[in-house]
Amino acid sequence: MKKALLILALALIGSAPLLLASGIGFTGLADNPLFREPSSDPYSFTSQLGIIRPADALSSPMEIMACVSDPETGKSSYVSLPIRSNAVSDPEYLNMKAGTSLGLLRTDLGFVKAELSLAGYINTVFEGFGGTDCLGLDGSYFLGFAIQGLDCLTLRFGLHHFSGHYGDEILETYYSTNSAVFEPFMSTIDVNGKTMNLSGPVQYVRDNSYLMSLSCDGPLGLRAYAQAELPRRESWIRPFAHVPSGYTNPSTHTDLIDRIGGSEAISADQKADENALKTGSSYRGWRLNGGLEWSVLLKDMTLLAGLDLQAHQDGQTAHQIGSYDPSRQWETELTATIAIMLKSALGARSLGLWASYHDGRFPLLNFFYQRTQCLSIGLRVY
Amino acid sequence: MKRLMLAAALAALSISMLAASGLSFSPFCTDPAYQESASDPYSFSSKLAMQFSIGQSSAPMGIKAIIKDKVTGQSSYQYLEYRSMTSNALAYLNMKGGFSMGLARLSLDTDTWFPKLSLEANVAGYLNTVFCGFEKNDALGYDGSYFIGASLKVADIVALRFGLHHFSGHYGDEMLEKFYARNNASFSSSGNTIEYNGTEYTLSGLVEYVRDNSYLLGASVNLPFGFRIYTEAELPKNPSWLRPFIHVPADYENPVATDTGHPTLIDRIGGNTADGEQVSQDQLDAEQALKRTSEGSYKAWRIHAGLEWSKIWTKIGILASCDVQMHQDGQTLHTIGGYSKTNPWELEVTASLSAVFPDCIGASSLKITAEYHDGRFPLLNYFYQRSRYASIGFQVF
């Protein structure tokens, strides 16, 4: 990563005088990036403030998955344990996301434009009941470049980071409910009346992946896009169950299944089994998404409708140790959005009142194992 | 009905006269009438900066927990480590995503002697987080803050803002896990425990910082030669939610009117409800009595002021600024029973120098900023952690 950044910096510094001498125009910083963030993509680099209303009790995150091992057998597993002992009726959630996507050093050659891309967000969800506890916090960023041809076809490529975190208040309640006992070398937690060794709550990390995006603006206000994300061969991936075989960690350059499994206190034979299960398979922890958008200008406003489909290859692991099965389906997410946007209300940005239906993962990375069907409404900056 | 129609007609006539005389309306303005400050650690801006602690005592190596002696039943706030100090543990990464905007603006510009006026409804907010710049880049915590109010700008010189301001601090999950393991924390539905100096204590929780909500009043004046001065004062509402309990002023009301068992905010935040700090009633009464010695002067005020100088050419500029914060809650020494009217307010000083690239993100500027800070660590829950650091990075506001 450092090498890549150094090469990029040197290339920029080295080529700047030549480019300047050539008379090609530059825009130092553009807040209307060539690759527009998709309106329905749950992982887009946008800002939003929304209320989430789950469709049913099963759609609300009332449990956290912990990595535990049986002290008798030494076998590890991921178990879902309740956050609190009392039931909550008709829960709602508040979603706050602060994000942006920018174009740097844009070059315009007429038929083709190119720029460096920088994007990121911090995302958090609060419970809309009780003490308004925070469920968690995500961080994501993107560093790369984008090229646009004929003002309609855009390609983006770069490195993409995902990191999930749990909320402090939720964890405290969770540990109390499940009688967790912490010690420097082995903590424990109560699972159905049995004391199990606790490695920690299951976390979601992709540090870093390659991300490639393609967008095409068609006639009649239509747009289609697709993105593919592939974890780098040398990167950090959590949880252990999602790690492909043959990957290495950036710190010691040793096997990643071994390294992440070690941090989750997985036994040597389970690590070997996981490796054997994935060796020779096509499993790489891919994330693919694609979508369609349609927009129409109505005086000073734009009406936008979008549909996004995500496919996660890590769904083939069933989010369990030793459960990878190449014949299992990829996990999918579907999001449909309708928005009324005030064009250029915020500089080059649009402010939108939006409503969406989502059938997929709960919108916090660490709760990837929580399927949810929900309706959301709120404000968003595109 | 006739009166109503007459009033409406008069209002319409006044508006059209005003419109003819220079009244205009603009929705959604990214150049809010009240400008954010470059050196204010709590400003509604976006930031990405590397932060280097000056000296090991400036780096947070632990957090304060609320613990209770099992024999005496007395509670105290104790600083417990979550990691050992190492020489490389001085670098941190600060990420803040924030904005400040006008939702709607009414402007009056008559081109006469009458000064230009802008009245605006405002909303602002940020999410702020700090990661360790060493080892596994653990998240130390994150903050949320927002402001809802209005501002008035006169003659493009004086700006005032007033509204409700929210602060809420949170700890990071990875750091908490290490903290609990290092201090042998044990959780159960009947009570949690933690080890401190080899003795087992009841763990009532972790010390948290909340202001939900406070009144915020700000004034800013543009002076000649590129200078600007500003000052803001923040006063927690009564009733409101305010943590930790030792920061609560005397005789503030419990916001939950139905909770008659805890008549004051000190009783509610420090007391035995599920969200309380489980402090014994005699300590709560003692805290109440101690705060009453202030004779109403202790209100957990936060006051800050600053001076900026800027010089903007067409595409680039320079901005130098200095901000001083004063926290009245420093008089509590952040310890149960520590309040004294004679204790000084806690001070924070921040000085920064920025290269400014104006209007490059909507009406916002991108700044490359170098900063020196002597004050609280830049996460709300670490208010008890004094920190001196130098930082360099990007700011957008």
Image (cartoon, rainbow, N blue to C red):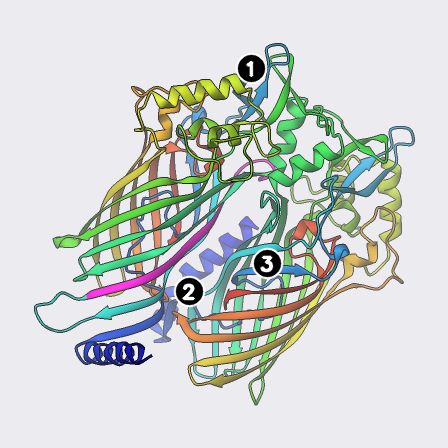
What chain does mark 1 sit on?
A: B
Q: Position of residue B336 (x, y in %)?
A: 47, 20
Mark 3 or 1, closer to the camera: 1
Residue A64, located in which quarter of the rendered image? top right
Question: Magenta span covers which residues?
Answer: B117-139
Question: Callout 2: 10 Å neighbours few (<14), some, many (20+)?
Answer: few
Circle 1: element type = loop
Judge from the rendering whether residue A281 lies leftward or rightward of residue A306; answer left or right.
Answer: right
Residue behind mark 3: A159
Quadrant of the rendering where the N terminus of chain B is positioned: bottom left
| Residue appearing at x 64%, y 13% in the figure | B70
Are the residues flagged by discs 3 and 1 from a single subunit? Answer: no
Residue behind mark 1: B74
Q: Residue A15 carries which label?
A: 2
CA–CA distance in space, label 1 to label 2: 68 Å
Judge from the rendering whether residue A76 lies leftward or rightward of residue B347; answer left or right.
Answer: right
Judge from the rendering whether residue B244 lies leftward or rightward of residue A204; answer left or right.
Answer: left
Q: What residue type is labelled 3?
A: Leu
CA–CA distance in space, label 3 to label 2: 22 Å
Residue furthest to the left in view is B113
What chain does mark 3 sit on?
A: A
| Residue appearing at x 56%, y 25% in the figure | B65
Q: What residue type is labelled 2?
A: Ser
What chain does mark 2 sit on?
A: A
